[in-house]
Image (cartoon, rainbow, N blue to C red):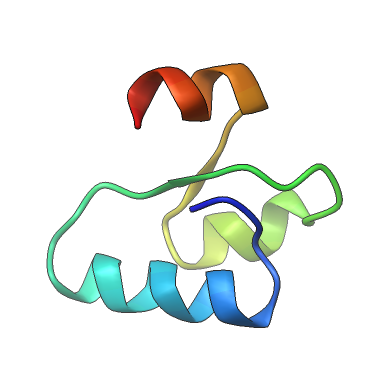
Amino acid sequence: VMGFGKVGTEVARRAKGLGMHVIAHDPYAPADKARAIGVDLVSFEEAITVA
């Protein structure tokens, strides 16, 4: 997920609900918010490589 605002968070939440491993890139997202729903925050380069 590129961007972890309201839309990105909801997309990640739904993907996790389907059993997907979710990574996200957002330089301003708090890590605790991502951890709370089981999302790994990664660098831009890693997100592009894995996508």
Residue 2's spot in the image, x, y percent? 57, 50
> Toward which corner of the image does residue 49 lie, by quadrant?
top left
Residue 45's spot in the image, x, y percent? 59, 17
**Camera-nearest residue between 23 and 3:** 3
Q: Number of labelled discs? A: 0
**Camera-nearest residue between 11 and 16:** 11
Q: Residue at x 19, y 55 (%)?
A: 20
Left/right placement of residue 7 relative to residue 18 reads: right
**Camera-nearest residue between 48 and 36:** 48
Furthest residue toward right: 28
| Residue 8 seen in this snapshot | yes
| Residue 43 seen in this snapshot | no
Residue 21's spot in the image, x, y percent? 25, 47
Left/right placement of residue 37 relative to residue 42 reads: left
Q: Residue at x 55, y 69 (%)?
A: 8
> Toward which corner of the image does residue 42 lie, by quadrant?
top right
Residue 36's spot in the image, x, y percent? 54, 65
**Whether residue 13 is situated above or below residue 2 in the rendered picture:** below
Q: Residue at x 46, y 52 (%)?
A: 39
Left/right placement of residue 3 relative to residue 9 reads: right
Left/right placement of residue 34 relative to residue 13 reads: right
**Whether residue 40 is situated above or below residue 30 in the rendered picture:** above
Q: Residue at x 50, y 30 (%)?
A: 47
Name the quadrant of the C terminus: top left
